[in-house]
Amino acid sequence: MPATQAAPWTWDLLLLLTLPPLFWAGNFIVGRAMRGVVPPVTLSFLRWAIALVLLLPFAWPALRRDWRQYWANRWRVLGVSIVGVAAFNTLVYTGLQTTTATNGILLNAFIPILIVLLGALFYRQPIGLLQVLGMAVSFAGVLTIITHGQWQRLAGLAFGSGDVIVFSAMVCWAVYTLWLRAIPAEIDRLGLLAVQMALALLVLAPLYAWEWAGGARVVWTWPSLAALLYVGIFPSVLAYLFYNWGVARAGAARAGLFIHLMPLFGALLSVLVLGERLHGYHAVGMAAILGGIMLSTRRMSRR
């Protein structure tokens, strides 16, 4: 995997890496809310179908111009399409049928750790002391929000088959982030995302047909339609595009660390959407998450 000079932190780069966790936090809330309303494979298939229809007109010029580059990197593109688009989202929606959104977001906190560990194991990426310390502080912030500031609650968290499925999705995302860096930076990310979506739909089509043949159907209501439009636009087109750009500029390890913002955004969305209240532990957790990110990204080289 090529090693390149670290991109300096700029406001636009920070925004690119901050918005995806916001959109993905909403995706977990929607995915959990739609259980029993939209079957998991159907949700994943329709999500990417909507996203591809919206993205294709904008990506078409890049697809026509760069198709030889996509073909030259076909196995890499196929790999990231399977693990990061088809498998990741289907596993998340399947796991959320039997686990809570809280558990799902908690398991997301392992993504930065998995990226660093897998990067060190398979790509010999060095692990710095500040990086480890920053991840630990940020992870502590995640646990503070999840446990409401009472860490003894961890002993009461129940983990079942749904959590195992969601955790396997987290492994897929860590692999996706690392593999994404192997795709040459000169390949247009807008066209790349469209190719990923198209390949993911091809992979999901037989599973979607199998789920349909088994009698699983969408319960069509205005909320279910709004949910499909949300997952098709924000956590799909916008979040993936921003994340792809962010990984290309910041590197896998630095970009992956921003996933720790998901519990924070999940709490804020619960306040705005569900009318829940903010508490002191939210502020403590937010400070730890942001502090850990700042500490870990300080002087980190691009991975």
Image (cartoon, helix red, strand yellow):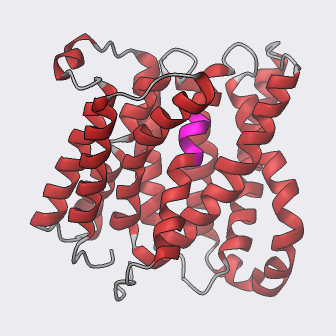
Instruction: Residue at 41%, 50% (x, y): give it.
Output: 259
Number of dots carrying numbers: 0
Residue located at (48% from left, 17% from top): 99
Residue 104 in picture, x, y percent from top left: 45, 29
Q: Give the extent of the magenta segment.
A: 23-28
Whether residue 109 is visible here, answered yes or no, is yes
Residue 14 falls left or right of residue 43: left
Q: Which x, y percent locates residue 148? A: 29, 23
State whether residue 267 is above or below residue 182.
above
Q: 256 left or right of 216?
A: left
Query: Is residue 205 at least partly visible in the picture?
Result: no
Q: Is residue 25 magenta?
A: yes
Q: Main secondary structure of the magenta part?
A: helix
> Residue drawn at (27%, 68%), measured in percent from left and top?
297
63, above or below 87, in the image:
below
Instruction: For the C terminus, give its image quadrant.
Output: bottom left
Rendered position, 151 above or below 110: above
Side (left or right) of 82 relative to 3: right
Corner quadrant of residue 66: bottom right
